[in-house]
Image (cartoon, rainbow, N blue to C red):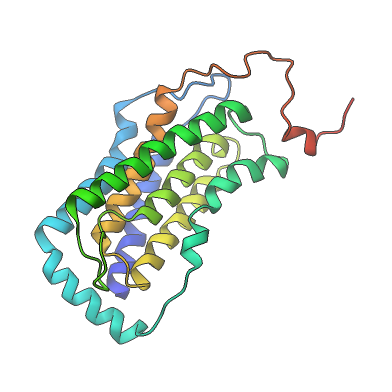
Amino acid sequence: MKKWVSLLMIFNVFLLNIAQQTDTLNLNNKRFAFQYKKIYVPAALMASGIIFDANGRESLKNEIVEERNEHLFGFTNHIDDYAQFAPMVAVYGFEVAGMQPRTDWQNRTAILIKGQVLNLGLVYMLKKTLKKTRPDGSAYSFPSGHTANAFAGATMLAIEYGDQHKWVPYASYGFATGIGIMRMANNKHYISDVLFGAGLGILSMKVAYWTHQYRWNRKKSEKDPFTALYIPAE
């Protein structure tokens, strides 16, 4: 189990370094411009999940379950059921705390909804179509919806705040990685489920940004209710 957790963390840090280089934002331009290189990270994660699932599922299943039972037998908690949504809450919470987001709250909310509709819709479709069994024997393992949720929120945090606050992508993606590790520790997912879910979450949120038309809040004079919480009235 420790070996696969370490592999997941190393792989995530490696891909995050690439993401930091390819996702540089321009705060003077709201639109998150599409570039092929911005697909590399989620595509690599999803491809890795497919490769692990297709070529090594049975051996990985036995090895991970054995190691998990040896080191974490009886371990279970529901923290990840709630923590998966923390990055999405932080998308608004960081602004309340005084950090400047890239997108106004109306468009940000629309992007969040579109990204999650795409993300959760694809997760549901894949689970119902593939019907992979979880390590604990229950249904619908591939891909990990909790991990997809966490990485979708982490991606939005990185896009909204990462340019002005360099620590945000590392903290958000590190947190999302923790959710994926916890899903494996809880005996709910294999590493293939987690890797694919991470890539799917990232890609879904990026697609939401790439396709957004910014039809809301075009009047510059309209005040943001979130900034009103920390910016004193004139």
Between 174 and 24, the one nearer to me in the picture? 174
- The location of residue 112, given as percent across then percent down, is 50, 36
- The location of residue 88, given as percent across then percent down, is 54, 46
Figure quadrant of the N terminus: bottom left
Residue in view at x 74 percent, y 15 percent: 221
Tell me where residue 18 sits by quadrant. Answer: top left
Please give left or right for residue 134 compared with residue 229 in the image: left
Please give left or right for residue 201 compared with residue 154 in the image: left
Is residue 4 at least partly visible in the picture?
Answer: yes
Up/down of 15 relative to 23, above or below:
below
Between 155 and 77, the one nearer to me in the picture? 77
- The location of residue 89, given as percent across then percent down, is 59, 47
Between 62 and 122, the one nearer to me in the picture? 122
Residue in view at x 25 percent, y 66 percent: 134
Figure quadrant of the C terminus: top right
Is residue 18 at least partly visible in the picture?
Answer: no
Q: Looking at this rendering, what residue extends furthest in the right direction?
A: 234
